[in-house]
Amino acid sequence: TWNAIGAGLTIPYVTALAVDPSMPTTLYAATGDGVFKSTDGGESWSMANAGLPRANIFALAIDPVTPATLYAATMGKGVFKSTDGGESWGATGTGLPVTVLASGEEWVTAITALVVDPVTPTTLYAGTGGQGVLKSTDGAASWGAANTGLHANAIVYVLAVDPTTPDTVYAGIWGGVFKSTDAGESWSRASTGLTSSDISALVI
């Protein structure tokens, strides 16, 4: 059985949830209009958007060692980081793929998935809407491509890191599941037996 929760969650379109591993009644919700935070197990919510752009938030990731550190992936504006439990956010990410629009505005390739290495939480992986996988080893300060073996222009919907062997990473893309055993340096297809090539969720 299920019960609706969410007083104060004014945007019903929730794209991702993150739970504080040290305080499981603290949750964060990514929505079509920023991030919301609950400290009572989802019964009530308040906006946690200071410093975030008005943009769709596609993914959230939480540092398992320092849960006050969070990352939010946006549509067109890059990756943002909070070190105070969502109270404030700042832009990060030199090296993210950027397109310059006719207006002169810079448009960052949509970041569609985000995951933190559970053993070395300064290492993150980001999935993109057409640029494959990106990797950061400095807490999202800089990013580089990690695409060897993936389809060109891969659209990545979900990423998962093996908690016991963090060099093993899985990517669910439009085209199946791919696996890396060398921390994203190279990828190989791992889709045998799947009946669909459109992978929207993975769990370990």
Image (cartoon, rainbow, N blue to C red):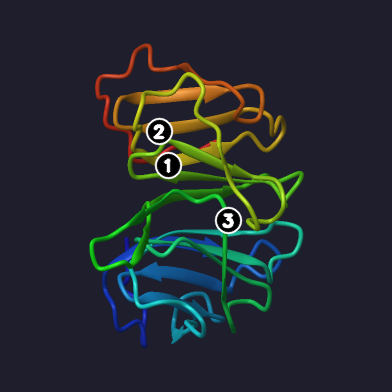
Q: Is residue 114 left or right of residue 157?
A: right
Q: Earlier in the sequence, mark 3 or mark 1?
A: 3
In front of the other: 158 or 104: 104
Picture layout, residue 146 above or below residue 61: above
Q: Nearer the viewer, mark 3 or mark 1?
A: 3
Percent from the top left, x then y, of residue 190?
45, 17
> Judging from the image, what secondary structure is the residue with disc 3 in?
loop
**Are the residues at dot 1 and dot 2 in contact (C-beta closer than 8 Å)?**
yes
Q: Against 15, is 49 above or below? A: below
Circle 2 SS class: strand
Residue 42 in the image: x percent, y percent?
A: 46, 76
Percent of width and height locating residue 186: 57, 21
- The tag on residue 172 is 2
- The local crowd at label 2, few if under 14, some if 14 to 19, many if 20 or more residues have their Cα within 10 Å, is many
Q: Are marks 2 and 3 in contact (CB under 8 Å)?
A: no
- Residue at point 67%, 70% (across, down): 23
Residue 94, numbered circle: 3
Q: Is residue 70 left or right of residue 157?
A: right
Q: Mark 1 highlights which residue?
A: 158
Label 1, secondary structure: give it. strand
Position of the C terminus by quadrant: top right
Q: Which of the 4 quarters of the picture holds residue 151?
A: top left
How packed mark 3 is, by other alpha carbons closer than 10 Å (few <14, some 14-19, many 20 or more), is some
- Disc 2 from disc 3: Cα separation: 25 Å
As shown in the figure, which amino acid type bears the numbered disc 1? Val
Question: Mark 2 or mark 3: which comes first in sequence?
Answer: 3
Q: Is residue 24 above or below residue 148?
A: below
Q: For marks 1 and 2, give the CA distance.
A: 5 Å
Residue at x 44% of width, y 84% of height: 45
